[in-house]
Image (tube, coloured by chain):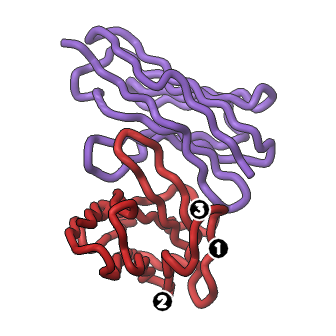
Chain colours: A red, B purple
Amino acid sequence: GAVVSQHPSWVICKSGTSVKIECRSLDFQATTMFWYRQFPKQSLMLMATSNEGSKATYEQGVEKDKFLINHASLTLSTLTVTSAHPEDSSFYICSASDTGGGQPQHFGDGTRLSIL
Amino acid sequence: GENVEQHPSTLSVQEGDSAVIKCTYSDSASNYFPWYKQELGKRPQLIIDIRSNVGEKKDQRIAVTLNKTAKHFSLHITETQPEDSAVYFCAALGTGQFYFGTGTSLTVIP
């Protein structure tokens, strides 16, 4: 149980393109999901907390207009990287918990985004 | 917010030896501390966790200790094997969000 599915796993696109990444909880409902960004050989940096039915909470320094988050249902959150540029290339990964207390977090497989 | 520091950043051990990774945190309200193992290009996998009302937890070759007073917790891997080679992250659950340590790249030399 407690499976988080993330799509797509790898995206290569041209600069200026907007890219949407989906995070789904397959066998549980998640009122809260988290989006992280991970550069090579570095840690997971929390970008934002996605809240079902309300606005996402962004970490300091993360542009909300650049990284659009929509949590339209209890099983789906999406992250859209708008007008992506090469510096947005990174590994994006989501997580969710099947318990109200957030323990433990289950991670999606991640999305490797490469902007040419 | 929470600040999690992790040491060392790299660690090499001989197969069969023990490995210890340490983390400190800043927020005294943090009450849940998981450890994740991440292989290259894959998702972090939870390997063990500990809650603030427990001082130590063990699962076969893996153990975690927590010192709430000093605000630090450690991962202990005994009888290391080559397949233990990966990057390990500690994390702390602060006020509703997880904050990760900087990671430790563990290499187990056969």
- In the figure, A77 relative to B56: above or below? below
Mark 3 closeness class: few <14, some 14–19, many ≥20 residues within 10 Å:
some
Query: Which of these two is toward me, A23 or A103?
Result: A23
- In the figure, B72 relative to B43: above or below? above
Q: Residue at x 79, y 48 (%)?
A: B29
Identify the mark nearer the N-term, 2 or 3.
2
Q: How far apart are marks 1 and 3 (CA)?
A: 16 Å
Q: How far apart are marks 1 and 2 (CA)?
A: 17 Å
User: In the visual, does B42 lie left or right of B58?
Assistant: left
Residue type for callout 1 = Thr
Q: Residue at x 35, y 58 (%)?
A: A90
What numbered label is drawn on residue B68? none
**In this rendering, the label closer to the viewer, 1 or 3:** 1
Query: Which of these two is toward me, B54 or A24?
Result: A24
| Residue located beneath label 3 in the image | A102
**In this rendering, the label closer to the viewer, 1 or 2:** 1
Q: Where is residue A40 in the image (x, y as percent from the top left)?
A: 35, 44
| Residue located beneath label 1 in the image | A57
Q: Is mark 2 on a helix, strand or loop?
A: strand
Q: Position of residue B20 (x, y in %)?
A: 48, 18
Do the residues at discs 1 and 2 belong to one chain?
yes
Q: Position of residue B37 (x, y in %)?
A: 38, 39
| Residue located beneath label 2 in the image | A73
Q: Distance between the residues labelled 2 and 3?
A: 18 Å
**Residue A58: quarter of image:** bottom right
Label 1 marks which chain's residue?
A
